[in-house]
Image: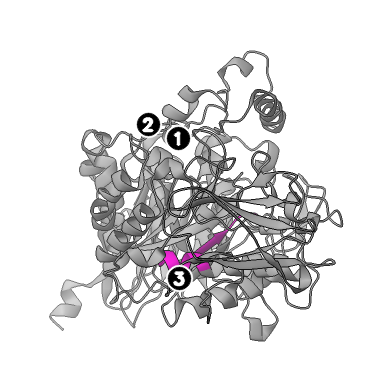
Amino acid sequence: MKLRRRYPVGAELQPNGGTHFRVWAPRPKKVEVLLEAGPGAPATIQLKQEEDGYYAGLVPQAAEGTRYRFRLDEAGCFPDPVSRYQPDGPHGASRVIDPSCFKWTDSGWQGAGIEGQVIYEMHIGTFTREGTWQAAQRELAELADCGITVLEVMPVADFHGRFGWGYDGVGQFAPVRLYGEPDDFRRFVNEAHRVGLGVILDVVYNHFGPDGNYLKQFSPDYFTDKYKGEWGEPINFDGEKSGPVREFYLANAAYWIEEFHIDGLRLDATQGIFDGSPEYIVAAIGKRVREAARGRKTIIVAENEPQLTKLVRPIENGGYGVDALWNDDFHHSGMVAMTGRNEAYYSDYLGKPQEFISMVKYGYLYQGQRYKWQKKRRGTPDLRLPPAKFVTYIQNHDQIANSGRGERIQFMTSPGRLRAMTSLMLLMPGTPMLFQGQEFGSSSPFHFFADLGPELARLMKEGRTKFLAQFRNLATREMLPYVADPAHPSTFERCKLDFSERKRNRDIYDLHKDLLRLRRRDPVFGAQKHGEVDGAVLAEECLMLRFFGNVGDDRLLLVNLGRDLHLDPAPEPLLAPPEGMTWQTLWSSEDPRYGGTGTPPLDSDDNWRIPGHAAVALRPIATEKSRHG
């Protein structure tokens, strides 16, 4: 019988019936499939040993819904490392899944490239009260209407417990059962595409979680001690017997694209993906994603704490071909500007206007300079990268949780400052990212949470407390009781969004919708061209950006995070309007609809008066004299 397989490992249904099982297990001498429930069960079938540590075999009686495990040398029974679904969690049996059962209706979807996108980071378990794919699906049309274009879903690889962020996943191919079945995930993506939203998935390719990881029973060569990992044993991408490990991850990347129609990946903590191979695994993953998409556009975003710009250079220019990088510099500088706090990992940021001008023009602030917090140089230089390659944000899952109380930024700054910083982020030429609920001023915190056993929970809480102690205020004795217990169910429950706040905070919601509409519809603000924006420092907390459009069609954005500014004199040429024209207010964060108090003309016979804690966008219009010759 001719077999049809899509991936080198896993359980795959065959056109003529039965399921073909294949697993990499060089450690045991014998591997058997135990059918435990569903079609064909009970039964035990020994798999045939192949070269390089693989075992494989066709099991005619196994079908969609069959639950199974692998027995290794009669030493124990374990779930499939490539299980497509774990109905009872990572310690339970795997289930045979037929991906062809789902009927897609997105054949016209062309995918999503990085240019022109607005990303929305979301955690399915807390995005709605129900915490399911089905419930989240109901909100997709509203997100699209708001101006979001791409959803970045936090990790869904199966993990132990009733709740968690997902970064401790152990079932790389199995969507966690907490949010629904695999077809519920497919239905979510299908609907997202219907309403015009791309979907990228956050994946963790740098370590496995501590609970439910059985890979060493199959082979210790999944891991390496050649490198030191921050969250656990690093993955073996370049050592002895690393070929099947690389194959495992390349198959996983393709799997999400092919079987779930995902539009790309966000790679977690790529600084923890160690690989000295001739082809870095991240570059190989990118190639595999593009191949799997079969012509659809895709997006690969990398988180990289050391800020290595080589990741986003084209492969033909010696880079790794990633599409975009998270820009922590923007977040850190923005937090200092909005809150005045610059301790711990904010130490190397002052939140000054020049920092934002430099980021608008060049992406990262640190591209090889000395970084005193880490006592070493940070970043690598590249001053000519396209702006879209930098994902900018003032909230994300990590940074909200790291506030100690899990508080949103609106509770740490003034409304005007927040409106102004939001305006800068959403109109500057990078790729903006919002965190779930940010668009309507959600008051829900976002704590770190994970449902682990008592011993792991204790170690996790101790580790979390130690990490937060880098902030001197969070290390104080009086603050410790207010740091939420990550393992307590109430910590998780408090993080769920309340969508009634969309109406209660209509001013904040309208602010975001209007800014995103302006970004989308105004060709100058939406251009995202390198070198097409310049800026100047106007005062200690005030900056201006000039967006160059066609002749006579520039835009100004003035962002004042300080007090009212009377700029007289105004010796800054970027403030000069095009010949025969004058500046007119196009948009202002001080619009009363957003909770502001109105915006008088900024440029007048009294020279420039720029309101404090505000952002104002201006466009040129012809003067009366020029209109009438």
Q: Is 264 in the magenta?
A: yes
Amino acid type of the residue tagged 2 in the rendering: Ser
Can residue 364 be seen here? The reply is yes
Residue 22: quarter of image: bottom right
> Disc 1 residue type?
Arg
Residue located at (46% from left, 41% from top): 562
Circle 2 SS class: loop
Disc 1 from disc 3: Cα separation:
36 Å
The dot on residue 443 is 2
Identify residue type, mark 3. Glu
Boundaries of the magenta span: 255-269
> Label 3 belongs to which residue?
258
Callout 1 environment at 10 Å: few (<14), some (14 to 19), or many (20+)?
many
Residue 596 location in percent, x, y? 27, 40
Viewer-nearest residue: 47 or 11? 47
Q: In the image shown, does 366 or 134 lie closer to the viewer?
A: 134
Q: Residue furthest left?
A: 628
Q: Nearer the viewer, residue 589 or 106?
A: 106
**Left or right of 370, for residue 406:** left
Residue contact at pointers 1 and 2, CB within 8 angstroms: yes
> Does the segment drawn in magenta span residue 311?
no
Q: For mark 1, what is the residue?
A: 408
Judging from the image, what secondary structure is the residue with disc 3 in? helix
